[in-house]
Amino acid sequence: MARVYNFSAGPAVLPEEVLREAADEMLDYKGSGQSVMEMSHRSKVYDQIIKEAEKDLRELMGIPENYKVLFLQGGASTQFAMIPMNLMKHKKAGYVLTGQWAKKAFSEAKIYGEAVELASSADKTFSYIPDCSDLPITEDMDYVYICENNTIYGTKFHTLPNTKGRELVADVSSCFLSEPVDVTKYGLIYGGVQKNIGPAGVVITIIREDLVTEEVLPGTPTMLKYKTHVDAESLYNTPPCYGIYICGKVFKWLKQMGGLSEMKKRNEKKAALLYDYLDKSSLFRGTVVKEDRSLMNVPFVTGNDELNAKFVKEAEAAGFVNLKGHRTVGGMRASIYNAMPYEGVAKLVQFMEDFEKNNR
């Protein structure tokens, strides 16, 4: 069977070149006589894989030396607890609520201290990013937390909040490596890799080294201390070895493609194609205000539940899969991550045009 165009929000499409390379190495990684799935994480061969992955990521993102890169487990959701456990020194932090994941992080933080809602876009089903130029931030807040790209709702912070000198902490799961980023603007930046970088099971956390201390909330488990993983260079326990190996291959693929500036251009071109069609369509419409649209996740609706369901069904039959939207938004969502080729979006738009003609 031919490969489909996979618009899943995550786990999501990976570069075909990476999958083929991994398939070629499945039984014998570079003459080691074993698969990466089978080798010890303490072996010299694996040590080179994880160190090279970190080196390539540092090059791609321009990560300064005073920031630590961690390959962790537990997905982005474990970070919801790990962040307050490690960073809430004054037991207070501010949260900007722009969707389900920010809300979940906010709820988790309340277990460990005072989590303050600084702003929210819940009033309009998270279809916009609230103004964050003058938030009610107080000096006793340890950090300000945002989910930078909202997978479900298709919004993106194109301007980072004014944190008034507080540390900025950002979940970038669904926009990771989609464009250049100035890491120095963040105290901590993290993301689950299963949307734009690799298979589920790995979360990458980039944290400024002065935030990594022994001073954590009482009762913080050893495994949930950033210092544990910094000191052990992500090898305190058995890491998700194979997932990290695939991430490393994706980093190399991104470098070959021309790096993050080139990816941003490609992503803007893909997104423009889909948004331009949605803006002129008389059947479909996007759900996000123009200035806050994500380049990665594009939700859209027809306004008719039966027609939405018919579209998803016919699209799947035509080889466009995982287009059903999240239940809180309804309709459809096309996630067009780095590995989605331009032709995939062009063919989807053509299919949408045909569907519109046939369902007027």
Image (tube, grey):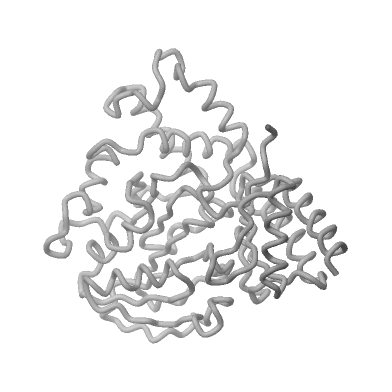
State the quadrant of the N terminus: top right
Q: Is residue 137 above or below residue 255?
A: below
Q: Position of residue 71 (x, y in %)?
A: 35, 44
The residue lying at 49 percent from left, 58 percent from top is 182
Horizontal relation, residue 319 to residue 326: left or right: right
Q: In the rendered picture of this protein, how many numbered marks are placed on residues? A: 0
Rendered image quadrant of residue 9: bottom right
State the quadrant of the C terminus: bottom right
The residue lying at 64 percent from left, 53 percent from top is 336
Q: Is residue 97 above or below residue 240?
A: below
Q: Position of residue 225 (x, y in %)?
A: 21, 54
The residue lying at 29 percent from left, 69 percent from top is 108
Give the residue at the far right of this rendering: 357
Rendered image quadrant of residue 252: top right
Horizontal relation, residue 359 to residue 248: left or right: right
Q: Position of residue 192 (x, y in %)?
A: 43, 52
Give the residue at the far left of this rendering: 218
The residue lying at 38 percent from left, 27 percent from top is 37
Rendered image quadrant of residue 332: bottom right
Q: Position of residue 88 (x, y in %)?
A: 24, 69
Q: Is residue 350 above or below residue 150?
A: above
Horizontal relation, residue 330 to residue 207: left or right: right
Q: Nearer the viewer, residue 281 or 306?
A: 306
Q: Nearer the viewer, residue 356 or 161?
A: 356
